[in-house]
Amino acid sequence: MNVRELIHDIAVSARDASRLLARLEGGVKDRALRRMADDLEANAAFLKEENLKDLESARKSGLKGAMVDRLTLSDRVIESMARGLREVAALPDPVGEVTRMWKRPNGLRVGRVRIPLGVIGIIYESRPNVTADAAGLCLKSGNAVVLRGGSEAINSNMAIAGILRAACKAEGVPERAIQVVPTVEREAVLEMLVCEDYIDLIIPRGGEGLIRFVVDNSRIPVIKHYKGVCHVFVDASADMEMACEIAFNAKVQRPGVCNAMETLLVHRKIARDFLPEIYKRYREADVEVRGCPVTRDILEDVKEATDEDWTEEYLDLVLAVRVVEDIDEAIAHIERYGSLHTESIVTNDYSNARRFLDEVNSSTVMVNASTRFSDGYELGLGAEIGISTTKLHAFGPMGLEDLTTRKFVVYGQGQIRK
Amino acid sequence: MNVRELIHDIAVSARDASRLLARLEGGVKDRALRRMADDLEANAAFLKEENLKDLESARKSGLKGAMVDRLTLSDRVIESMARGLREVAALPDPVGEVTRMWKRPNGLRVGRVRIPLGVIGIIYESRPNVTADAAGLCLKSGNAVVLRGGSEAINSNMAIAGILRAACKAEGVPERAIQVVPTVEREAVLEMLVCEDYIDLIIPRGGEGLIRFVVDNSRIPVIKHYKGVCHVFVDASADMEMACEIAFNAKVQRPGVCNAMETLLVHRKIARDFLPEIYKRYREADVEVRGCPVTRDILEDVKEATDEDWTEEYLDLVLAVRVVEDIDEAIAHIERYGSLHTESIVTNDYSNARRFLDEVNSSTVMVNASTRFSDGYELGLGAEIGISTTKLHAFGPMGLEDLTTRKFVVYGQGQIRK
């Protein structure tokens, strides 16, 4: 079987499995999820053995320390996959939820009911735990999943999927609900992306390069975000201590992720008080600051921010700082340079809080909170399959609900159209 | 200015207008919509004059009767455009609706709020009334719209848009909220479809050829349906008279539209009673029936249905009929040949009604009602911008709600991530 036939076969059987999955009772899915968790833990030794093969090739091919780290299936990672699956099992089943129902003047009762999307393709890099996390969320939401991980993790991913599939089978869930593409050939990705008759949605998870490659080559709708250039705006009325805590947390607590702050905007009126305060803390944490002329006037040893800095996602201990005249200039800056991900205002002014929430149309807009909360778990969705900064279908962190769509159901008594 | 520059200029100014539109109060939008309606009626003579230019070119180029009909701006059509705008003004504003709000254990209040999508591109054929209908729905939902109608209607579309824009301006709505592409060059469509940085969504309205062209060339998400192969399944327990009325209405009341029935499925147990009844009525209405072998055994002068008939959208007084063993075979037929548009079961059996509603995952699924009700107005959405048979973003008839997306808003008190 060549790669094209292989992918076609996987996609067609995923579509068949998705029909059965859509009809499964919630209890069956939850039992399968819990068994998946148990079996991952019970087979930890086998998983680590298979993972060792990937780690050895990685070392041979000269993969760097951080990448090797992300590739490693430690006991802690295996436990966290199992815990994730159990948490998903405990969430309410999104399928079948009636989101609204109403009666028409002619007596028709019309409702909207959640159904699975069908087949989801996930294209990801490095971390093998995505295999279990994504499979769990797709199963819970009644979708079949086709997983295409990085070539460097192929043995780990196949091992995880093998255990998950066996658990499915034992609980009466079609095995083909979860499939890993069993080849490292890059052509396989391209073949997946043209299976528009069998795959309903592609979710790429990885760097901007991977995401652009997927978007450029896909005939299937793609849910994505390229980058997170998140802003915190410290307004004139901000509580100074709160502003310091939030600006520090948003940058430093985990700088390598998309909801970390990349640009700090400060109201001119408080810049002379606030900037030296926060800069002291940034220096202790080795944060490099690049500033606008006014910032550099206040903080003398700071580098100049160029126009590129305002759109840069550093994913590192680097921060761009700009002093603005007022909230209008702050909102205009976000509109011009932002990535529609997450923005936060620190303020004690009611009208400015309201204006920021109303006028900034990024996917997550906050008052007096760290941008780091922009995450499916932290916002209370129970889980996260990804984050979308395109406005179609979903916008922002996506939980189980965003892996479904809604059909109309109509209960009649013989109505015909006049 | 060449076509590329022209379209780029339109798209950029639409994006600018969309930022202002997103912040408009509902009252301003509604006043503009009502003024648009008044001004269309007041300028009926001018509209008919401009329309005459299109009609003359159409006749010269040999356009057929039905096409000329659809192109004509009669007083009746102008009144119906005005009525449509007033109805949309009377609907509730979808923008700003808080669809859910909850509190997290750390005190964060998290909500989801409807916001406009941004800029919508509509690509359509023939009927100039789409110009007013689509502009009204986009304005109400806070979106800027770029309208690209058929070349045969360019004078009519420009005249309508001119009146709508003047009404916007008079009511404080940015004129650039509504723009018609002022050229008949086909290249303009291609240029629109690559403006992914300025246009958020493309909705093609027209024949399957137009839709495929748009999908194949667009870098922007497209909401579409290719065709409606709608089914009615008459179950063994169906009330005979009700089944006749529904099967007749679904096929005959308006055969040229996507929610008309194309295939009738009949349970074997009642086929000998039901088919001769309904066939009598079909013959009176000049409906051509093509049947499976069992159907042809019962109705002797009926043509044979080939495999192509089961996937055909006739849009005409032609019907494919198949006798099935049971509800399983009916559902399997719909799954295999259907287009995910609309299906209806006529039954008096509770479990079969439930199974049909649960297991058929088309965008609209009905019990004891004509498929002709699958329409935004008839289902109670208040309006319809289109119908989607792809499951992403929207599935089924789309009203104002589906021209919006939701952002997360977070109200904090200084929370940081631990």
Image (spheres, coloured by chain):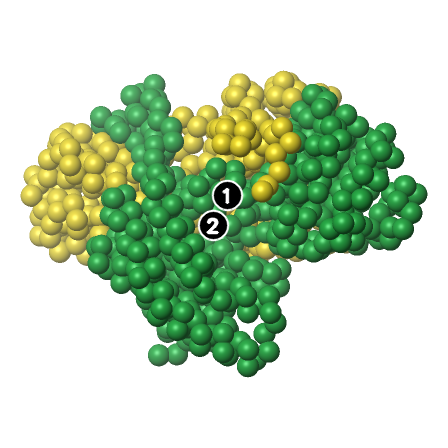
Chain colours: A green, B yellow
CB-based contact (under 8 Å), mark 1 and mark 2:
yes
Q: What residue is disc 1 on?
A: A376
Residue sitting nearer the eye, B141 or B181: B141
Q: Taking the image as drawn, is residue B187 in sight? A: yes
- Tell me the quarter of the image containing the N terminus of chain A: bottom left
- Disc 1 is placed on an element classified as loop
Q: Is residue B221 above or below residue B20?
A: below
First of labels 1, 2 by sequence position = 1
In screen coordinates, is B325 left or right of B313? left
Q: Real-space Cα distance between discs 1 and 2?
A: 8 Å
In screen coordinates, is B88 left or right of A287? left
Q: Chain of mark 1?
A: A
In screen coordinates, is A117 left or right of A319? left
Rendering coords of residue B91 (x, y %):
51, 21
Q: Chain of mark 2?
A: A
The residue at 25%/28% (across/down) is A412
- What crowding class fits label 2: few (fewer than 14 Cα within 10 Å), some (14-19), or many (20 or more)? many
Q: Mark 1 and mark 2, same subunit?
A: yes
The disc label shown at residue A250, or none? none
Quadrant in which residue B186 is drawn: bottom right
Residue sitting nearer the eye, A377 or A204: A377
- What crowding class fits label 1: few (fewer than 14 Cα within 10 Å), some (14-19), or many (20 or more)? some
Q: What residue is disc 2 on?
A: A385
Quadrant in which residue A375 is drawn: top right
The residue at 33%/55% (across/down) is A37
Q: Taking the image as drawn, is residue B276 in sight? A: no
The residue at 78%/41% (across/down) is A278
The residue at 54%/66% (across/down) is A69
